[in-house]
Amino acid sequence: DLAASLDAISEKGTDAFYKGAIADAIIKASGAKGGILAKPDFEQYAVRELKPVTCTYRGYEITSSPPPSSGGIIICEILNVLEGYPLSYLGAGSAETVHVMVEAMRYAYVDRNSALGDPDFVDNPVSKLLDKAYAKDIRDKIDPFRAGVSQDLMPKGFGESKETTHYSIIDDAGNAVAVTYTLNGSFGAGVVADGTGILLNNEMDDFTQKPGVPNLYGLVQGEANAIQPKKTPLSSMSPTVVAKDGKPFMVIGSPGGSRIITITLEAIVNVIDHGMNIQEAIDAPRIHHQWLPDKVYVEPFGLSPDTEKLLAGMGYHLDLADQTWGQAAGILVGGKSLAEIEKGGGARYNGAIDSRAASGEALGY
Ligand code: DON
Protein backbone atom coordinates (compact mmCIF):
# COMPACT_ATOMS: atom_id res chain seq x y z
CA ASP A 1 0.00 0.00 0.00
CA LEU A 2 2.79 2.40 0.90
CA ALA A 3 4.51 1.64 -2.42
CA ALA A 4 1.26 2.53 -4.22
CA SER A 5 1.02 5.84 -2.31
CA LEU A 6 4.63 6.69 -3.14
CA ASP A 7 4.07 5.79 -6.79
CA ALA A 8 1.04 8.09 -6.93
CA ILE A 9 3.05 10.96 -5.39
CA SER A 10 5.97 10.40 -7.76
CA GLU A 11 3.66 10.34 -10.79
CA LYS A 12 1.23 13.17 -9.89
CA GLY A 13 3.31 15.27 -7.52
CA THR A 14 2.23 16.65 -4.15
CA ASP A 15 -1.42 17.00 -5.27
CA ALA A 16 -1.69 13.24 -5.09
CA PHE A 17 -1.15 13.54 -1.36
CA TYR A 18 -2.88 16.81 -0.50
CA LYS A 19 -5.79 16.79 -2.90
CA GLY A 20 -6.48 13.23 -3.95
CA ALA A 21 -7.49 9.84 -2.65
CA ILE A 22 -4.67 9.73 -0.11
CA ALA A 23 -5.97 12.85 1.67
CA ASP A 24 -9.50 11.39 1.64
CA ALA A 25 -8.26 8.13 3.17
CA ILE A 26 -6.37 9.97 5.94
CA ILE A 27 -9.41 12.16 6.73
CA LYS A 28 -11.56 9.02 6.90
CA ALA A 29 -9.10 7.21 9.18
CA SER A 30 -8.84 10.24 11.46
CA GLY A 31 -12.63 10.77 11.56
CA ALA A 32 -13.25 7.12 12.42
CA LYS A 33 -11.38 7.68 15.72
CA GLY A 34 -12.96 11.05 16.47
CA GLY A 35 -10.22 13.11 14.76
CA ILE A 36 -11.11 16.45 13.19
CA LEU A 37 -8.87 16.57 10.10
CA ALA A 38 -10.79 17.99 7.14
CA LYS A 39 -10.19 18.59 3.44
CA PRO A 40 -9.14 22.27 3.83
CA ASP A 41 -6.36 21.21 6.22
CA PHE A 42 -4.80 19.38 3.30
CA GLU A 43 -5.79 21.71 0.47
CA GLN A 44 -4.49 24.80 2.23
CA TYR A 45 -1.19 23.31 3.30
CA ALA A 46 1.79 25.11 1.84
CA VAL A 47 5.47 24.68 2.48
CA ARG A 48 7.09 27.77 3.96
CA GLU A 49 10.61 28.56 2.91
CA LEU A 50 12.33 30.15 5.85
CA LYS A 51 15.75 31.55 6.49
CA PRO A 52 17.86 29.05 8.39
CA VAL A 53 19.33 29.82 11.78
CA THR A 54 23.05 30.46 11.78
CA CYS A 55 25.64 30.86 14.49
CA THR A 56 29.32 30.24 15.08
CA TYR A 57 31.03 27.83 17.46
CA ARG A 58 34.77 28.13 18.08
CA GLY A 59 35.20 29.54 14.57
CA TYR A 60 32.92 26.99 12.84
CA GLU A 61 29.76 28.14 11.08
CA ILE A 62 26.55 26.33 11.99
CA THR A 63 23.44 26.45 9.80
CA SER A 64 20.32 24.72 11.04
CA SER A 65 16.54 24.69 11.13
CA PRO A 66 14.59 27.85 12.05
CA PRO A 67 11.21 28.00 13.86
CA PRO A 68 8.78 26.28 13.77
CA SER A 69 11.59 23.94 14.70
CA SER A 70 13.36 24.99 17.86
CA GLY A 71 16.33 22.85 16.88
CA GLY A 72 18.65 25.39 15.27
CA ILE A 73 18.12 28.08 17.89
CA ILE A 74 18.53 25.74 20.83
CA ILE A 75 21.63 24.04 19.41
CA CYS A 76 23.16 27.49 18.84
CA GLU A 77 22.14 28.73 22.31
CA ILE A 78 23.71 25.70 23.98
CA LEU A 79 26.86 25.96 21.83
CA ASN A 80 27.17 29.68 22.67
CA VAL A 81 27.11 28.81 26.37
CA LEU A 82 29.58 25.94 25.95
CA GLU A 83 31.99 28.10 23.96
CA GLY A 84 32.95 29.74 27.27
CA TYR A 85 34.14 26.43 28.77
CA PRO A 86 37.34 24.55 27.80
CA LEU A 87 35.49 21.34 26.94
CA SER A 88 38.40 19.62 25.25
CA TYR A 89 40.52 20.22 28.37
CA LEU A 90 37.71 19.07 30.69
CA GLY A 91 37.35 15.90 28.62
CA ALA A 92 34.49 13.90 27.16
CA GLY A 93 32.26 12.39 29.85
CA SER A 94 33.98 14.12 32.78
CA ALA A 95 31.75 15.40 35.59
CA GLU A 96 32.69 18.99 34.76
CA THR A 97 31.79 18.57 31.09
CA VAL A 98 28.49 16.87 31.89
CA HIS A 99 27.72 19.56 34.48
CA VAL A 100 28.17 22.51 32.12
CA MET A 101 26.41 20.71 29.27
CA VAL A 102 23.39 19.84 31.41
CA GLU A 103 23.15 23.37 32.81
CA ALA A 104 23.37 24.88 29.32
CA MET A 105 20.65 22.46 28.18
CA ARG A 106 18.49 23.31 31.20
CA TYR A 107 18.58 27.05 30.45
CA ALA A 108 18.11 26.64 26.71
CA TYR A 109 15.11 24.31 27.08
CA VAL A 110 13.42 26.81 29.41
CA ASP A 111 13.67 29.29 26.51
CA ARG A 112 12.52 26.67 24.03
CA ASN A 113 9.50 25.67 26.08
CA SER A 114 8.42 29.13 27.13
CA ALA A 115 9.31 31.54 24.32
CA LEU A 116 9.32 29.75 20.96
CA GLY A 117 6.52 28.88 18.57
CA ASP A 118 5.35 29.03 14.98
CA PRO A 119 6.76 32.28 13.55
CA ASP A 120 3.41 33.04 11.86
CA PHE A 121 1.93 33.36 15.35
CA VAL A 122 4.81 34.16 17.70
CA ASP A 123 7.46 36.84 17.64
CA ASN A 124 10.38 34.51 18.43
CA PRO A 125 13.22 36.26 20.30
CA VAL A 126 15.77 34.76 17.89
CA SER A 127 18.44 37.43 18.06
CA LYS A 128 18.33 37.53 21.87
CA LEU A 129 18.69 33.75 22.16
CA LEU A 130 21.56 33.69 19.66
CA ASP A 131 23.42 36.58 21.26
CA LYS A 132 26.84 35.61 22.70
CA ALA A 133 26.27 38.15 25.49
CA TYR A 134 23.09 36.29 26.47
CA ALA A 135 25.11 33.07 26.60
CA LYS A 136 27.55 34.78 28.96
CA ASP A 137 24.65 35.83 31.21
CA ILE A 138 23.66 32.16 31.40
CA ARG A 139 27.23 31.09 32.19
CA ASP A 140 27.35 33.66 34.99
CA LYS A 141 24.30 32.03 36.55
CA ILE A 142 25.72 28.50 36.45
CA ASP A 143 27.18 27.48 39.80
CA PRO A 144 30.43 25.65 38.97
CA PHE A 145 29.97 23.22 41.83
CA ARG A 146 26.27 22.57 42.10
CA ALA A 147 23.45 21.29 39.91
CA GLY A 148 20.82 23.88 39.08
CA VAL A 149 17.19 23.41 40.09
CA SER A 150 14.75 23.45 37.16
CA GLN A 151 11.90 24.66 39.32
CA ASP A 152 13.90 27.82 40.10
CA LEU A 153 13.90 28.69 36.39
CA MET A 154 10.14 28.49 36.02
CA PRO A 155 9.15 31.54 33.98
CA LYS A 156 6.48 33.85 35.41
CA GLY A 157 2.94 33.13 34.28
CA PHE A 158 3.99 29.71 32.98
CA GLY A 159 1.04 27.47 33.55
CA GLU A 160 -1.25 27.48 36.48
CA SER A 161 -0.15 26.28 39.86
CA LYS A 162 -1.63 23.04 41.18
CA GLU A 163 -1.83 24.60 44.60
CA THR A 164 -4.45 26.09 46.79
CA THR A 165 -5.10 29.80 46.22
CA HIS A 166 -4.27 32.66 48.53
CA TYR A 167 -4.79 36.38 48.05
CA SER A 168 -4.23 39.35 50.34
CA ILE A 169 -6.15 42.57 49.73
CA ILE A 170 -6.37 45.96 51.37
CA ASP A 171 -8.75 48.66 50.16
CA ASP A 172 -8.59 52.43 50.11
CA ALA A 173 -10.35 52.65 53.46
CA GLY A 174 -7.73 50.35 55.03
CA ASN A 175 -9.92 47.25 55.26
CA ALA A 176 -7.65 44.22 55.02
CA VAL A 177 -8.70 40.77 53.85
CA ALA A 178 -6.62 37.61 53.65
CA VAL A 179 -8.29 34.72 51.81
CA THR A 180 -7.13 31.15 51.29
CA TYR A 181 -9.36 28.62 49.55
CA THR A 182 -8.72 25.09 48.50
CA LEU A 183 -9.86 21.89 46.84
CA ASN A 184 -7.10 20.19 48.89
CA GLY A 185 -5.27 18.09 46.26
CA SER A 186 -4.78 19.27 42.69
CA PHE A 187 -8.24 19.14 41.05
CA GLY A 188 -9.68 17.88 44.34
CA ALA A 189 -11.49 14.58 43.87
CA GLY A 190 -11.10 14.98 40.10
CA VAL A 191 -14.89 15.03 39.72
CA VAL A 192 -16.92 17.87 38.17
CA ALA A 193 -20.58 18.10 39.14
CA ASP A 194 -22.27 17.71 35.76
CA GLY A 195 -23.34 20.97 34.19
CA THR A 196 -21.96 23.17 36.98
CA GLY A 197 -18.25 23.38 36.23
CA ILE A 198 -17.75 22.97 39.97
CA LEU A 199 -15.09 20.55 41.13
CA LEU A 200 -15.62 18.35 44.15
CA ASN A 201 -12.81 18.65 46.69
CA ASN A 202 -10.99 15.84 48.44
CA GLU A 203 -10.91 17.56 51.81
CA MET A 204 -11.74 14.27 53.57
CA ASP A 205 -7.97 13.68 53.49
CA ASP A 206 -7.55 16.56 55.93
CA PHE A 207 -9.25 14.37 58.55
CA THR A 208 -7.34 11.66 60.38
CA GLN A 209 -8.10 8.61 58.27
CA LYS A 210 -6.53 6.40 60.91
CA PRO A 211 -4.38 7.51 63.85
CA GLY A 212 -0.72 7.13 62.93
CA VAL A 213 -1.27 7.04 59.16
CA PRO A 214 0.12 10.07 57.32
CA ASN A 215 -2.20 12.01 55.03
CA LEU A 216 -1.40 13.63 51.67
CA TYR A 217 0.86 16.17 53.40
CA GLY A 218 2.54 13.64 55.68
CA LEU A 219 0.61 14.82 58.74
CA VAL A 220 0.20 12.13 61.38
CA GLN A 221 -2.91 13.06 63.33
CA GLY A 222 -5.04 11.71 66.17
CA GLU A 223 -8.58 11.17 67.38
CA ALA A 224 -9.38 14.88 67.83
CA ASN A 225 -9.46 15.19 64.03
CA ALA A 226 -11.22 11.87 63.40
CA ILE A 227 -14.00 11.70 60.81
CA GLN A 228 -17.41 12.29 62.36
CA PRO A 229 -20.80 13.37 60.99
CA LYS A 230 -21.17 17.15 60.67
CA LYS A 231 -17.52 17.70 61.57
CA THR A 232 -15.15 19.90 59.54
CA PRO A 233 -11.64 18.58 58.93
CA LEU A 234 -8.69 20.35 60.51
CA SER A 235 -7.09 22.76 58.06
CA SER A 236 -3.66 24.40 57.95
CA MET A 237 -4.90 27.38 55.94
CA SER A 238 -3.68 30.53 57.66
CA PRO A 239 -5.02 33.72 56.06
CA THR A 240 -3.54 36.23 58.49
CA VAL A 241 -3.73 39.92 59.27
CA VAL A 242 -1.02 41.29 61.58
CA ALA A 243 -2.04 44.57 63.23
CA LYS A 244 -0.08 47.19 65.17
CA ASP A 245 -2.00 49.43 67.57
CA GLY A 246 -5.24 48.10 66.11
CA LYS A 247 -4.36 49.01 62.50
CA PRO A 248 -3.40 46.55 59.75
CA PHE A 249 0.39 46.16 59.50
CA MET A 250 0.77 43.06 57.34
CA VAL A 251 -1.62 40.86 55.35
CA ILE A 252 -0.20 37.46 54.54
CA GLY A 253 -0.98 33.85 53.63
CA SER A 254 -0.07 31.06 51.23
CA PRO A 255 -1.03 27.70 49.83
CA GLY A 256 1.21 24.75 50.73
CA GLY A 257 -0.80 22.09 52.60
CA SER A 258 0.62 21.45 56.05
CA ARG A 259 3.46 23.92 55.29
CA ILE A 260 1.10 26.90 54.99
CA ILE A 261 1.55 27.46 58.71
CA THR A 262 5.34 27.70 58.65
CA ILE A 263 5.37 29.65 55.37
CA THR A 264 3.13 32.32 56.89
CA LEU A 265 4.96 32.26 60.22
CA GLU A 266 8.38 32.70 58.59
CA ALA A 267 7.20 35.67 56.50
CA ILE A 268 6.03 37.38 59.69
CA VAL A 269 9.27 36.60 61.57
CA ASN A 270 11.36 37.74 58.60
CA VAL A 271 9.67 41.16 58.63
CA ILE A 272 9.43 41.71 62.38
CA ASP A 273 12.63 40.05 63.60
CA HIS A 274 14.99 39.96 60.65
CA GLY A 275 14.20 43.37 59.17
CA MET A 276 13.54 42.01 55.70
CA ASN A 277 11.31 43.92 53.36
CA ILE A 278 8.03 42.27 52.42
CA GLN A 279 9.40 40.83 49.15
CA GLU A 280 12.56 39.50 50.81
CA ALA A 281 10.52 38.09 53.69
CA ILE A 282 8.37 36.10 51.26
CA ASP A 283 11.21 35.05 48.98
CA ALA A 284 13.66 33.97 51.71
CA PRO A 285 14.36 30.20 51.65
CA ARG A 286 12.12 28.28 54.02
CA ILE A 287 12.50 25.58 56.61
CA HIS A 288 9.69 23.36 57.84
CA HIS A 289 9.07 20.85 60.60
CA GLN A 290 5.72 19.22 61.40
CA TRP A 291 6.55 16.83 64.26
CA LEU A 292 6.31 13.75 62.06
CA PRO A 293 8.20 12.79 60.03
CA ASP A 294 10.97 14.03 62.36
CA LYS A 295 12.79 15.95 59.65
CA VAL A 296 13.76 19.53 59.04
CA TYR A 297 12.77 20.26 55.44
CA VAL A 298 15.06 22.87 53.91
CA GLU A 299 14.52 24.67 50.63
CA PRO A 300 17.41 24.86 48.14
CA PHE A 301 20.17 27.18 49.47
CA GLY A 302 18.15 27.56 52.69
CA LEU A 303 21.13 26.83 54.92
CA SER A 304 24.84 27.27 54.41
CA PRO A 305 26.90 24.05 54.40
CA ASP A 306 28.38 24.87 57.83
CA THR A 307 24.92 25.53 59.30
CA GLU A 308 23.80 22.18 57.89
CA LYS A 309 26.76 20.49 59.61
CA LEU A 310 26.11 22.27 62.92
CA LEU A 311 22.44 21.26 62.88
CA ALA A 312 23.24 17.67 61.92
CA GLY A 313 25.71 17.64 64.83
CA MET A 314 22.90 18.73 67.14
CA GLY A 315 20.90 15.68 66.08
CA TYR A 316 18.64 17.16 63.42
CA HIS A 317 17.66 15.12 60.39
CA LEU A 318 17.82 17.51 57.48
CA ASP A 319 15.86 16.90 54.33
CA LEU A 320 17.50 19.12 51.73
CA ALA A 321 14.70 19.55 49.23
CA ASP A 322 15.37 20.12 45.56
CA GLN A 323 12.10 22.03 45.20
CA THR A 324 10.59 25.05 46.86
CA TRP A 325 7.12 25.17 48.36
CA GLY A 326 4.31 27.69 48.83
CA GLN A 327 3.22 30.83 47.03
CA ALA A 328 2.83 33.54 49.62
CA ALA A 329 1.12 36.84 48.84
CA GLY A 330 1.55 39.70 51.27
CA ILE A 331 1.08 43.39 51.88
CA LEU A 332 2.98 45.62 54.30
CA VAL A 333 1.36 48.89 55.29
CA GLY A 334 3.34 52.13 55.47
CA GLY A 335 6.60 50.95 53.95
CA LYS A 336 8.44 48.05 52.36
CA SER A 337 10.12 47.09 55.63
CA LEU A 338 9.88 47.79 59.32
CA ALA A 339 12.81 50.23 59.02
CA GLU A 340 11.07 52.18 56.26
CA ILE A 341 7.81 52.26 58.22
CA GLU A 342 9.62 53.54 61.31
CA LYS A 343 11.34 56.28 59.28
CA GLY A 344 7.95 57.34 57.85
CA GLY A 345 7.29 58.33 54.26
CA GLY A 346 7.14 54.80 52.81
CA ALA A 347 4.43 53.89 50.32
CA ARG A 348 1.03 53.34 51.87
CA TYR A 349 0.61 49.76 50.62
CA ASN A 350 3.49 47.50 49.59
CA GLY A 351 2.46 44.29 47.90
CA ALA A 352 4.66 41.28 47.21
CA ILE A 353 4.01 38.02 45.40
CA ASP A 354 6.22 35.03 46.02
CA SER A 355 8.96 34.80 43.39
CA ARG A 356 8.26 31.02 43.51
CA ALA A 357 4.75 31.67 42.18
CA ALA A 358 3.94 30.32 38.71
CA SER A 359 1.33 33.04 38.41
CA GLY A 360 -0.02 35.90 40.48
CA GLU A 361 0.95 39.52 40.83
CA ALA A 362 1.13 42.39 43.28
CA LEU A 363 -1.26 44.98 41.86
CA GLY A 364 -2.25 48.50 42.86
CA TYR A 365 -5.74 49.84 42.31
O1 DON B 1 -6.83 22.99 54.47
C1 DON B 1 -5.72 22.49 54.34
O2 DON B 1 -4.88 22.54 55.21
C2 DON B 1 -5.39 21.82 53.03
N1 DON B 1 -6.61 21.33 52.44
C3 DON B 1 -4.66 22.78 52.15
C4 DON B 1 -4.21 22.15 50.87
C5 DON B 1 -3.25 22.97 50.11
O3 DON B 1 -2.77 23.99 50.52
C6 DON B 1 -2.88 22.38 48.79
N2 DON B 1 -2.04 23.26 48.02
N3 DON B 1 -0.91 23.48 48.13
Image: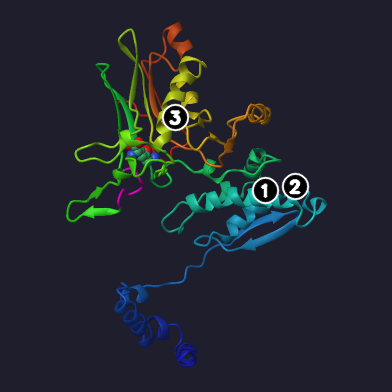
Q: Position of residue 199 (x, y in %)?
A: 25, 49
Q: Residue furthest left?
A: 195
- Mark 2 highlights which residue? 85
Q: Position of residue 2 (x, y in %)?
A: 47, 89
Q: Is residue 351 above or below residue 199?
A: above
Kind of residue sitting beneath label 2: Tyr
Q: Which circle's residue, 1 or 3, is located before the other in the chain?
A: 1
**Residue 173 appears anywhere in the view:** yes
Q: Which circle's residue, 3 or 2, is located before the other in the chain?
A: 2
The reply to whether dot 3 and dot 2 touch (C-beta < 8 Å) is no
Residue 187 in magenta stretch: yes
User: Looking at this view, is 262 or 2 the one in front?
Assistant: 262
Badge 2: few (under 14), some or many (20 or more) residues near its Cα, within 10 Å?
Answer: some
- Mark 3 highlights which residue? 263
Q: Is residue 242 above or below residue 307?
A: above
What's the residue at 56%, 52% (across, down)? 109
Please identify, in this view, whether the residue under mark 1 or under mark 3 is nearer the observer: 3
Badge 3: few (under 14), some or many (20 or more) residues near its Cα, within 10 Å?
Answer: many
User: Looking at this view, is 362 or 33 the one in front?
Assistant: 33
Magenta region: 184-189
User: Looking at this view, is 205 or 280 the one in front?
Assistant: 205
Give the CA separation, mark 1 to mark 3: 36 Å
Report helix, strand or loop for mark 3.
Answer: helix
Query: In the image, is the residue at mark 1 within 8 Å of ligand 1 by its beta carbon?
Result: no
